[in-house]
Image (spheres, rainbow, N blue to C red):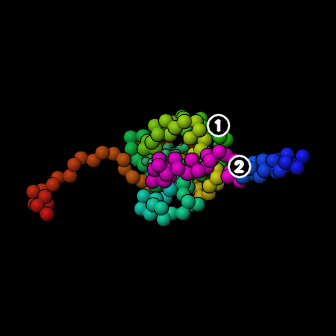
Amino acid sequence: MKKSLIALLLATFALGAVAHAGGDGGLVDRGRYLLAVGGCNDCHTPGFAQRGEQIPETERLTGMAVGFSGPWGVSYPANLRLVAAGLSESEWLARSRRGGLPPMPWGALKAMSDKDQRAVYRYLRHLGASGEAAPAALPPGAPIPTPHFVFVPQPPTTVTLGQLAH
Ligand code: HEC
């Protein structure tokens, strides 16, 4: 009798420990890892390309109001925390699979397993909603009211022999 009571208590503690670890089978940690190796902060976190790891995790992935301009018009890296906060997990999966405009690496996102997609979502929900939504994409030829990178190949610049000597 006493033994089974102890076993029950131990089992309860073990379950408590699992719940404490997030109860998500490590999905939040996996999501954190995937966003790091996926280079997602480079576009989705303002200033990340310049300041990198100095930007605290709590301030990351809030999107950028600096657009990417090309033949597709202008696209803006979304505030992923707000997008995730506004979607259910299955809506997130459908959104990620649908794709969209360059230079977002849609192929990388589509290649993720459902489990990894869910991990990314859980991590973003774990960070929570923060910041403003990124501006909506613009069609080709529309006036561009924000700073933007021009994502169009440029011809080579002329290099003189004198410059090569330096
Ligand atoms: C080269 C810059 C760049 C990188 C790197 C990048 N993104 Fe994006 N992302 C964008 C842009 C630009 C958009 C907006 C695309 C559009 O309007 O269709 C976007 C849109 C998205 C969206 C759609 C959000 C919505 O509004 O529905 C998701 C989800 C997303 N990115 C996830 C990721 C993840 C996850 C990674 C890392 C694996 C990543 N992105 C890496 C530029 C980037």
Q: Is residue 112 above or below residue 67?
A: above
Distance of label 1 from label 2 (alpha carbons)? 24 Å
Provide the secondary structure element on which disc 2 rests.
helix
Residue 56 quadrant: bottom right
Report the quarter where the C terminus lies.
Answer: bottom left
Residue 107 is a magenta residue: no
Question: Residue 135, can we see it?
Answer: no
Q: Residue at x 46, y 44 (%)?
A: 104
Question: Which dot, 1 or 2, sits closer to the camera?
Answer: 2
Using a 10 Å C-alpha cutoff, classify the residue at mark 1 as few (fewer than 14 neighbours), some (14 to 19) or many (20 or more): few
User: Mark 2 belongs to which amino acid?
Assistant: Val
Using a 10 Å C-alpha cutoff, classify the residue at mark 2 as few (fewer than 14 neighbours), some (14 to 19) or many (20 or more): few
Along the viewing direction, whichever of 14 and 53 lies nearer the viewer: 14
Residue 116 quadrant: top right
Provide the secondary structure element on which disc 1 rests.
helix
Q: Where residue 77 appears, x then y in whole percent?
A: 50, 49
- Residue farthest to the right, as pictured: 1
Is 156 positioned to the left or the right of 161 in the image? right
Numbered label attached to residue 18: 2
Q: Residue at x 11, y 61 (%)?
A: 165
User: Mark 1 belongs to which amino acid?
Assistant: Ser
Q: Which residues are magenta?
A: 19-44
Q: Residue at x 61, y 46 (%)?
A: 27
Residue indicated by mark 1: 90
